């Protein structure tokens, strides 16, 4: 996969070329390239922004350097997706990342200041994506987040594909707790089922804990996972036990509150 990032701050992207993504690039699984929008400015001082029509605070990124940079990068028969990172966009989810991971090529546009002249978006952008309901100073960190979560879904990048499949969101549940050596740390021990080498028991424990943590933290996600799913008798027993555990835990504070009420 090829990911090109149009930015006025190409020097911000060093982290994308290190660690696992750096290794994937060296292995030829992925190409990440930053393109400086400023180099395309026809303005005398290579400016990339100007004051907004209609007044108001801040500056707006000029359409011309962005449109020229995009057209140069995409070339003649571009087959991929051109994305503007923007707080107004559709929120990035694991499902969206999976969809984007199947593209041959992505071109990401990073905005700055008050944003980008709408005409550049109308001319050369296919969709807008937000990384969450908050506002950043620029699109660079958002582009890095998107690149990281898409790139790790490319076969071979993680080195162990099952780890992406069992992770939070991919399986429909949040992930169960993980442990490594030593068996005991500051008095806390690793749960017994993970130590005995019985794979059926380990899988049962992992399912139980994943469901438990999802019910506690993201009940709507757990509901969606539970509804319409067919369980074996053994799985059903595990699921019922988790539901009962959560029911009791929710009931206890309510009972305590009722008991402490005066009179
Ligand atoms: C200060 S923001 C502009 C915000 C814009 N005036 C608005 O209210 O929607 C500057 C740039 O940061 C990026 N950005 C900010 N928040 C973002 C988010 N939540 N997701 C993706 N990109 C974001 C966009 O590229 C945006 O053009």
Image: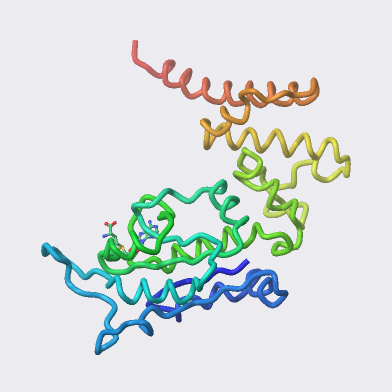
- Which residue is painted at 68% across and 21% down in the image? 240
Q: Position of residue 215 (x, y in %)?
A: 57, 31
- Which residue is painted at 19% across and 68% down in the image? 58
Q: Position of residue 13 (x, y in %)?
A: 49, 75
Q: Is residue 200 found left or right of 189 in the rendered image?
A: right
Compared with 34, 215 (above or below) is above
Q: Quadrant of ligand 1?
A: bottom left
Quadrant of image for the C terminus: top left
Q: Position of residue 222 (x, y in %)?
A: 58, 31
- Which residue is painted at 67% across and 60% down in the image? 154
Q: Nearer the viewer, residue 85 or 79?
A: 79
Q: Nearer the viewer, residue 259 or 234?
A: 234
In the rendered image, the residue lying farthest to the bottom is: 44
Q: Position of residue 208 (x, y in %)?
A: 70, 33
Q: Nearer the viewer, residue 176 or 107?
A: 107
Specify how the rendered protein is coloured.
rainbow
């Amino acid at each position: 996969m090829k990911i090109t990032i149009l930015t006025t701050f190409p020097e911000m992207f060093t982290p994308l070329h290190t660690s696992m993504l750096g290794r994937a690039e060296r292995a030829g699984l992925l190409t990440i390239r930053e393109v400086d929008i400023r180099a395309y400015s026809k303005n005398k001082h290579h400016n990339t922004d100007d004051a907004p029509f209609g007044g108001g605070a801040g500056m707006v990124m000029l359409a011309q350097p962005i449109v020229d940079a995009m057209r140069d990068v995409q070339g003649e028969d571009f087959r991929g997706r051109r994305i503007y990172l923007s707080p107004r966009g559709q929120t990035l989810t694991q499902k969206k990342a999976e969809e984007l991971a199947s593209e041959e090529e992505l071109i990401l546009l990073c905005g700055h200041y008050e944003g980008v002249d709408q005409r550049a978006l109308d001319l050369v952008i296919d969709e807008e994506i937000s990384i969450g309901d908050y506002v950043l100073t620029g699109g660079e960190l958002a582009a890095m987040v998107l690149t990281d979560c898409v790139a790790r879904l490319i076969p071979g990048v993680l080195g162990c594909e099952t780890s992406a499949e069992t992770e939070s969101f991919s399986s429909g549940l949040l992930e169960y707790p993980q442990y490594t050596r030593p068996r005991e740390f500051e008095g806390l021990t690793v749960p017994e089922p993970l130590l005995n080498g019985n794979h059926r028991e380990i899988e049962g424990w992992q399912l139980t804990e994943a469901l438990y943590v999802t019910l506690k933290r993201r009940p709507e996600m757990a509901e969606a996972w539970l509804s319409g799913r067919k369980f074996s008798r053994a799985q059903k027993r595990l699921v019922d036990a988790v539901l009962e555990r959560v029911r009791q835990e929710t009931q206890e504070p309510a009972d305590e509150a009722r008991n402490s009420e005066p009179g």
